[in-house]
Amino acid sequence: MAEEKGVKLLDLWSSPFGQRCRIALAEKEAEYEYKEENLSDKSELLLKSNPIYKKIPVLIHDGKPVCESLIIVQYIDEVWPSKTPILPSDPYARAQARFWADYVDKKVYECGTRLWKLKGEALQEAKEEFILILKTLEAELGDKKYFGGETFGLVDIALVPFTSWFYSYETYAGFSIEQECSKLVSWAKRCKERASVAKTLYEPKKIHEFVGYLRKKYGRLKREKRRMAEEKGVKLLDLWSSPFGQRCRIALAEKEVEYEYKEENLSDKSELLLKSNPIYKKIPVLIHDGKPVCESLIIVQYIDEVWPSKTPILPSDPYARAQARFWADYVDKKVYECGTRLWKLKGEALQEAKEEFILILKTLEAELGDKKYFGGETFGLVDIALVPFTSWFYSYETYAGFSIEQECSKLVSWAKRCKERASVAKTLYEPKKIHEFVGYLRKKYGVE
């Protein structure tokens, strides 16, 4: 892409994801050029700027594209630090903000969409789920002015664009958000008093017209968190075979952090796990001085921020950090889910999964290129995100009938380099041991 100075945002007027970026830019008083995209006929600039997902929003800063709305918002915060901070300075508070913004990302849009797409029993289930999501968010908000306390920040920016959609959700699903979550509605009104929000969001009736268009186009297509007893030190709740937990173990090893490891039985989860991660009830959970941090990539970034004197996991340059977060997020969204299908499915479905998995690996290999690690000479976030899955490659190959080395030799060489690092070597299990575990899973799920 030709180098050009300045800031450009590729977006769609109604997109709550793009609105996050517009609010963040307004908070930072950053001047930028807005380019409205036609998603039925995407511009060449969009396709070049986001070749992986081909979606808006994309922020182009001095010719360099940054994709995915929450990554963009964090990038904006880092590049323009002198204005209103979006993320707090405390690493734990930052981790909590990222967790709740990630929760909004995973829950609100998808469930909200079902409210105007579905009917009957399916709609009722979606409504109950959506109310639970909002109540969970309201419990986290509590009596605070904003999610971060007195400061308007990342979680507010992540959620507030969806409040323009509340009228449509209520209309099609037949309920009142104000009756269910009055504190959340009051929070939304406070947010809309901010100039950055007021000038970005559209009237609910205009969004409702847009939802009506979407319905035609697609043709009918908890309470406040309990504080745990203060307990000094570091504890990791995990499962030996989990590639997500292994990310955390590698990061802790890179930082030479001493910690207590607690193996979880996922068929009989400990009360500590359920209390520490009441939202997802999953491993891994890092507990630092009694405070839990959840979701593996958030944990790895937290580890990097709390122990900065040792090997850095994320680069110091904001753009390089944004790129690392993008590719780690790509691994998160693609590798595990598709890899699981390789040992769960058969026949034509297996063949499709294999082709998709090879494409995912080739995409990652293209990003790796001739570099030693994804970040260049430095072992970092993307390497930590991906390398645990390499112990599963043997099982993927065995059940799907292909050779990763034949398809992606550079990626296999990268994996061997990673395994020469003490942090990786002492964390990963032999592929044959993982293969035995996959055999157990196949029996458990009735695949064999």
Image (cartoon, grey):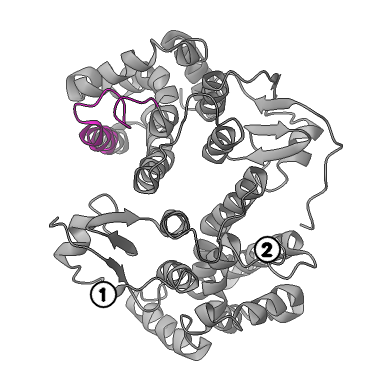
Is 154 situated above or below 389? below
Label 2 crowd bin: few (<14), some (14–19), many (20+), radius 10 Å = many
Is 394 magenta? The answer is no
Left of 262 or right of it: where is 226?
A: right
Residue 18 image position (x, y, % from top left): 40, 69
The quarter of the displayed image where residue 6 is located: bottom left
Q: Residue at x 40, y 37 (%)?
A: 315
Q: Which residue is mark 1?
A: 35
In-front residue for pair 413/278: 413
Q: Residue at x 66, y 80 (%)?
A: 190
Residue 347 image position (x, y, % from top left): 29, 32
Label 1 crowd bin: few (<14), some (14–19), many (20+), radius 10 Å = some
Assign a secondary structure to mark 1.
Answer: strand
First of labels 2, 1 by sequence position? 1
- The residue sitting at the front extreme is 82
Q: Residue at x 73, y 71 (%)?
A: 145
Query: Label 2 vs label 1: CA separation?
Result: 30 Å
Which amino acid, by three-letter code, is at mark 1?
Answer: Lys
Which amino acid, by three-letter code, is at mark 2?
Answer: Phe
Q: Residue at x 53, y 25 (%)?
A: 251
Q: Which residue is mark 2?
A: 147
Is 187 situated above or below 373? below
Q: Which residues are magenta?
A: 356-379
Residue 343 image position (x, y, % from top left): 40, 26
In-front residue for pair 135/365: 365
Visible in this render: residue 119?
no
Assign a secondary structure to mark 2.
Answer: loop
Visible in this render: residue 130?
yes
